[in-house]
Structures are given as structure tokens and as C-alpha cells.
Amino acid sequence: MSGPDQLIATSRARLARARFWTQMLILLVRPESSDRGHGSDATPHELDDRHTHARNKVRRRGVVWLAYGFSARNLLRLLAPALLVFLPIGLLAVPALVVLVDGSAAVVNSDFELIGRPEPPLLEWAAAVLVVSVAGQAVALPATVVLAAGLLAGKDVSISGALRVAARRWPAMAALVLAGVVAFAAALAAGLGVLVWTGAQGLAYVVMAVLALFAMPCLLAVASVALEGRSAKDALARAYRLAAGASGATAFTLAFGVVLFPLLAEQAANWAVSGLPVAGYVLGLVAVPFQAAVIARLFLHRLVIKGTIAEFKEIVDGLPESAPRPARLMPVLAGLLLPGLLYGGAVLTNPLGWPEVSETAVTQTWPLDFEEDGRPKPELGGSELQALYAGQGGRMVMLMDDFAPAKLLTCMDSTCTRTRFTWAEPVGAVPGYTAAGARLADGRLVVSTWAQEGADEDGLVLDYDKWRARLGLLLCDATACVPAPGGKPITEVTSSTQDRTVALAARPGGGLLVAQLYQLPLRESDSAKEGLSITTCDDPACTHPRTKEVAKLPAHRYRDNDRGIIAGVGPDDRPVVLRFDRETGAVFVVSCDDPACARARTGRPVRGSTGYSDGQAGAAMLVRADGRPLIAYLDVNDGAIKLLDCRTRECSQAGTTTLSEPGHNTAPAMVLDRDGRVLVAYQDLDREGIVIATCTGTVCAQTPVTTITRGGGRGLAMALDGRGRPVIAWTDFWDWHDWDLVVTTALNLPPA
């Protein structure tokens, strides 16, 4: 070919390609309904041409992408059935939910949330909404299939006509839904059976996936019911006949186009809007046209390939023919946005006064790095939470301690999304002694620590005769701790078997109170007892400690770590110390008649149980302005959280208020808010929620503030932040590899 001829041929080829892509672009942006006929005005020849054109269109491969593009171009029209069915369901279901929640709901991180385990009325509501939604889907999906088939075939079908067809064929669709539920249950049971039999989780997933793919052609039965009016049985048989010869391609097309891609899109949307429920509602509605288009196009595609022209014409001629009104943008947008607007307005204004909560899961993996003292950065354990304090600058500081030296976890902002985690105790601190802390008036913390002699760098005792451990103090701001300047050892232990439990409390004049509980030597005529000593200091560094043994209390000789103490000081500078037994739940209160504790009185307001408990008993104490303590404790006899209103300083007489239902609850934490109300927080494990009981006198109201998503039960502490709001730090524990440290702030609480 000569040069000019070759140039002409190349130009013609380029022109042809340009024409082809121009036509494709026009088809992409132009609704396919634009080449429809005009109902009964079309001549038989025009109808035959239109049927031929429609058959050629649906014969093309790439069903999923063609169906998705088709749905996007006709989205307004195809959305109408789902909107007309599901919008009334949602608008009726939400008011019923508001009536049923009855105090078990909160606004958590600006999102409505049901708190704890749902009660039977809520479960019944959820079951009813699920049944009605499935019934609605059994109308909306086939109606959308009818609309999509009409648009693909170039025939006018009104929305009302499509809904009437779907409603008439609802019994067959209900039977298909039932068959789908049975198929899903069978696949799940087979997978679980394989898992139990072999223990191979991967194999179980493979079995379920294979069975699910085998059941996918059942979705074509929806089109057979909607377009051909068949019974459920005949529609299923028809679906598998159409899939024959391309079973794998049909199953994967339906799996990806109807199930996986819509599910992935919903997950992505939830992630993009932080799990906002309205996004799931909108995506659920928008997914229906895409799912219906895939089903309709694949059904017609397989019918054209395997069927006859007469069958195709019969389906097209059977579609309800009418003059449809154009779908308008504003009503469709209003239907999509109305639930979101109502939801956002309800969350923003909170007309029912639900508790508003800010919550952050602060747990993270700190990188292995080296501090200046040569130690790696501390790691956080699931059982290390000891106390929570409002530190300097309104920062919340958590004291963490278990078997390793104590640590500080500081929330650097109000939401605790930025944290600082550092060692509190220095290198060489005695392991196994749990650190105690107290908040000083200037916002600093004072933390107890034990220094030892006669041990190597790893804490291994080299010479038991020379081993010593001395109790000292650390002064901490929100980021670091230093030894108390000028401080002297408060006590000395000469044997590693002499366990000590320490509690600290700030004195009104700026001094410090140190309470110690320790085991007394056992004599032949004596029962096992523990000694309680009090050290009074005139300054936080305790430069001149004065120690006095004030009481001897019953003890369990062969139980380790079964005791806990809480130190308090009244406004008149008179010490009050609470001792509780983690096993029996017994509570003792020791009160001093003067600041130096020249005379002490002991009361036992809670006898406890003689049986063995799970070691989770605990208590919290506040000292009121008149010096009388308030005590919240876990009653091991019935598992309820109770409040003791002590009538005397040693609580030998007290009134009791029950704050929680009996059952499985965890040890409480307690604070006094700026309005003088008593706030008691605890984990209700039976109802899977964190609860704050607000008490004014003996009148108390319980407010669930967040949900326990794992197992809870590993510790809880509470303090007031700089704005006087209760902040709860708690561990949501499932196992040693699956737990979270959570900080929950109650932004508002209803009055008691």
C-alpha cells in the first residue's frame, strides 16, 4: 500500500474508533430509556426491532458492570420502590424504639446507642422490625426487578404498576425468602459441623463459601417470580435451568454483584462516616437498585442465550404497561435525607434527655524504645489499672501497677485520644508491692514506692539476711515522677515474705497520711491478725514521719493479696481508714479521735461471707464534711452494689441503700461531685453496661452510660475532670490478647 493510501486508511480507522467511543459515551450518560418505544403507538415492526435491540443489549457480557452503570443512570427511578416501602417502616419503628428504651439509651460520641444487653421488649421490637423489613424487601426487590426489566426492554413501566405486580406475587416471594433462610442455615450448620469435627477454621469457611455459591442461582428465582409469575418451586427450578452450562459464572456474578460489592460499599461508607447508622440505612436503600439490576440483567442475559425469542417476548409483553411519571430529584432526596435529618436533629437537641457520653478506647501498642534510664518503654497490662486522678492542667492521670514497677498513663487532652505512658517508679523498685497514690491540692500526685537492698538489677535476692525494702514517696506531675525531696523512709521490711498494703491520703493542711496493713506474727494462743499503722506527715515529702499502730484486725493466714485499704482524712484532719477483704467482703472502719490518732475506734459495718468468693469484692469510701464516711461496696452474698450511710465515724451504725440489682457486678468507684451528689460507678456484667448511680441523700438513680463489649470485670476507677464531669477508666477484658482500656466521660447526668 502506498503512502497516501495508508494515510487514508489510518484516518478512516481513527474516525471509526472516534465514532465508536462517542457512541459509547452517549450511551453511558444517556438513560437507556431514551430509546424506548411509545407504548401502544408502536407498530409491530417497531416492537420487533425494539425486542431485537433489547435482546442484543442484554446478551452482552460483563453483567455486573453493565448493570451497575445502568442503575447509576436510572437511580432516581429505581430507588422509588425501596423508598416507598422502607421509609414508612423506619418512621414507624423509630418512635416505638424511643418508647421501649426506657433509660437504656445514651448519646455516645454524638451517636445514639443502646446501652448494655437488650431487655425482652427491645428484642421483641428488633424481631418485629426484622420480620417487617424482610417482608418489605420481598416487595421492594421484585418491584425494582420489574422496573429494571422494563427499562432494559425499552418498555414503559410505572412505579405503582411494578409495586402492584410485586404485591400480587408476595406469597411466592415469601416462600423464596423462607427457602433462602433454610439454605443459609444449612450452610452455617455445615460449616460449624466441619469446624467441630476437624477444628480447621479455614476448611469450615471453604465449606460455607462453596454451599453459598451453590445457592446463589436462587436469586434468579426472584426475577422468575416477578417477571413470569411462577410459583417459588417452579421459579427455583427455572433459575437452575437457566444457570446450567455457566453455573460458576452465574454464581460468582450473583455473589459479587448482589452480595459482596454492596456489602463492601456499606462497610466503606460506615468507616467513612464513623459508623453513623443513617449511612447504613441510605446504603441499604441505594443498594436495592444495583442488586435488582444485576438480577434482572443476568436473568434476561441467560434467557436470551438459552431461551427462545418467544419466551423473551412473552416476558416483555407481560410487563405492566403504563405511562410513567418522571422520577423527580427532590422527593427522592427528601426520602433519603429525612431519616438522617431527623436522627441528626434528635442527637443534636437530645429532647428526651438521654445521657451524653464521650468515650475513647485508649489502648495502643507502644513501640519498643529505650528511655534515658536504660529501660524499655513500659507496656500496659489488662489488670494494671489502680486509680484515676485529675492531675495538673485538668489532665486525667491513671496509676498503673501490677507485678512490674508502677507507671503513669496521662490523657493529654479531654477525649484521651492523645496519651503519654511512662514509668513512675525508678529502676530497682521492689516488684510485687502495689503502689498507692493520692492527689495533692496543687494537682500533683504522691505515689508510694519501695526501694530494696541485697538484690541484683533483675530484682533477684542475693542474700536474704541482708535484704531490706524501705517505703518512700514519689512526687509526680502529669508526665514524670521524682523522689520526694528530703523524704525519709517511712517503714522498713526485712523479709521478702512480709507483704504490706499501703494507702495514701492528702491532709487538709498540705500534709500526708500513710496507712499500712501488715501481717502480725502468729502466737500459739492467738488467731491470725493484721496490724494497721498510720503515719502522719506535715508535708507531702514526709520529711518528719510519725508512725503509730492503731488497730489489730482479723486476717486469713493462708490467703495472699486478699486485703485492701483506703485512707481518708476529714476536714478536721482526723484520719479514717477502711479495710476490706477481697474474698469474704468484710468491711472494717478505723477512725481516730484526733489528728495524731492517740485513740482509735473500730467498726465492722459489713460482716461479709464465710464462703469463698471469686476475690472480686471491693469498696470505695468518701469522708464527708462532718467526718462521717460514706462507703460503697460489693455485697458478696448477693452480688449487689450497696451504699453505707455511716452514722458514726467508725461506721458502727449505718443505713444501707441498694444501688444495683443482685447478680454479677464489679467493685465500685465513688466520687462526690460539685453539687454534693454522691456518684457511684460499677460494671453491671449481667446487663453488660457501665452504670453510674447518682445519690442525693438516700434517693438514688441509676444511669447506664456505656456498653461492655467484651467481658469487663478487670478494674474500674473514677474521678472528676477539670469541668466537674465524672470520668471513668475501665478495662474491657476478654482474654490477655483481646482487651481495651476505655475512658468514658459522662457529659450530663440526670438528677437523682
Image: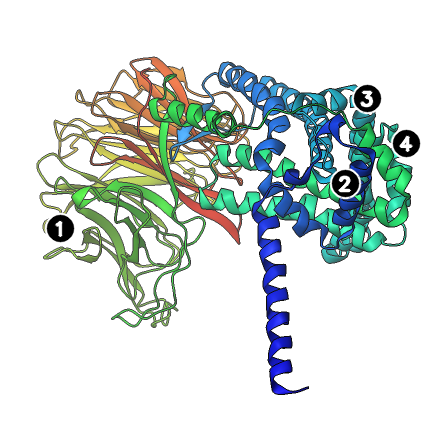
- Kindly indicate whether the residue at mark 1 contacts the one at mark 3 (C-beta within 8 angstroms): no
Q: What's the distance in space between the residues labelled 2 and 3, CA to CA?
A: 33 Å
Q: How is the image coloured?
A: rainbow
Q: What's the distance in space between the residues labelled 1 and 2, CA to CA?
A: 94 Å
Q: Nearer the viewer, mark 2 or mark 4?
A: 2
Q: Looking at numbered disc 3 in the image, what kind of residue is underneath it?
A: Pro
Q: Which mark is residue 233?
A: 4
Report the residue marked by disc 3.
171
Report the residue marked by disc 2.
50
Q: Is residue 70 left or right of residue 752?
A: right
The spot of residue 522 in percent (x, y) is 40, 45
- Kindly indicate whether the residue at mark 4 contacts the one at mark 2 (C-beta within 8 angstroms): no
Q: Is residue 477 left or right of residue 322?
A: left
Q: Is residue 357 left or right of residue 244?
A: left
Q: Nearer the viewer, mark 2 or mark 3?
A: 2
Report the residue marked by disc 1.
541
Would you call the spot at circle 4 few (<14 residues within 10 Å), some (14-19), or many (20 or more)? some
Q: Is residue 35 visible?
A: yes
| Relative depth, front residue between 470 and 713 | 713
Q: What's the distance in space between the residues labelled 3 and 1, CA to CA?
A: 81 Å
